[in-house]
Image (cartoon, grey):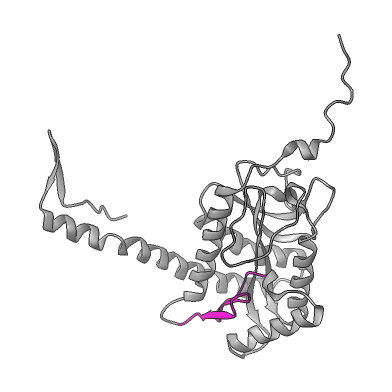
Amino acid sequence: MRNLEPPFKMGFLGSYCTIGKMKDYYKDRPELPVKQLTARIEGAYHRFFAHFSESSGINHSLSKGEVRENPVRDFFESLLPRRFSVSSGEIIDSRGGISPQSDLIIYRTLDGIPILNMQPTILQVESVMCVTEVKSVINISEYEDCLIKAKKLFKLRPFDTELQKYQRGRDPGPEDCRIFISIFAYSSNTKSGLDEEAKRYLECAKKLDIDPGIVDRIYILGKGVINPADGRYAADTNERRIGLFYYYSNLLQFAMRESTRRNEVPYLYYFGRMSEGWKRI
């Protein structure tokens, strides 16, 4: 790693420097993290392609699924702050509700306690920030599968209240939970652009009578990212993988914001009545 030192020295009375040099230093410095992050996104982009090619030669469905999901898990784990962990499994609420199994779940490490010490596992809904379905090839049936899973996820009751959907200008309280739901696809069964890809997804949602905004982002490797709720998309290009960059940054911003303002997991809800079994001395 390059040793980037600011153009000043520390003396007995503190720092002293040339004002012009300091301005130049701090003017240029913000560009450096962007370049570093862009390089890491570019590297991840090429690794996704490599792993996808590797998994195409595997016939066993379970092994193929693991090879498909692991690179995306590694991508999240390497670029998300340590306050978050990534697992696969199911999500429960204190009422006994349970979600379908999810490929990747990003949860708050501080209070998200996996019920099974293995993967897939079970996590409390209040600790969950994001859920991602990973698909080898996205098509109409896979879109429908993701929409149905998302609808079932919304039956969970964090803090004994309903999960919230995307709403611009939302001002939630500490027990108003929203989960960032996304689809990561290595490829599509159509060569059409992102505008036609978005139309296919919207048609699936209409057919199932499910709000298309229930899925926050759809990222397709080599194509780009779709934002169904806002009706926008950003395409990857040879010059810059802008779709993957936006997908990651949108997910990160959501997780950081949601985890900071949301209350901790109410474990007493899950433990049930605490008065049974006690006897007076």
Residue at the spot 12% in from the left edge and 49% down from the top edge: 17
Residue 233 highlighted magenta (yes or no): yes
Residue 131 x/y as whole percent: 67, 61
Q: Is residue 79 left or right of residue 267?
A: left
Q: Is residue 84 above or below residue 62?
A: above
Residue at coordinates 72% horizontally, 58% vertically from top-left?
A: 163
* Residue 111 spot, x, y in % from top left: 64, 41
Q: Magenta residues, as a range?
A: 215-237
Nearest the viewer among 276 and 88 is 276
Residue in the picture at 54% in, 69% down: 247
63 is higher (above) or lower (below) than 231: above
Q: Residue furthest top?
A: 281
Q: Give the tally of numbered discs.
A: 0
Q: Is residue 248 magenta?
A: no
136 with respect to 258 (left or right): right
Please give left or right for residue 95 compared with residue 177 in the image: right
Q: Residue at x 75, y 66 (%)?
A: 150
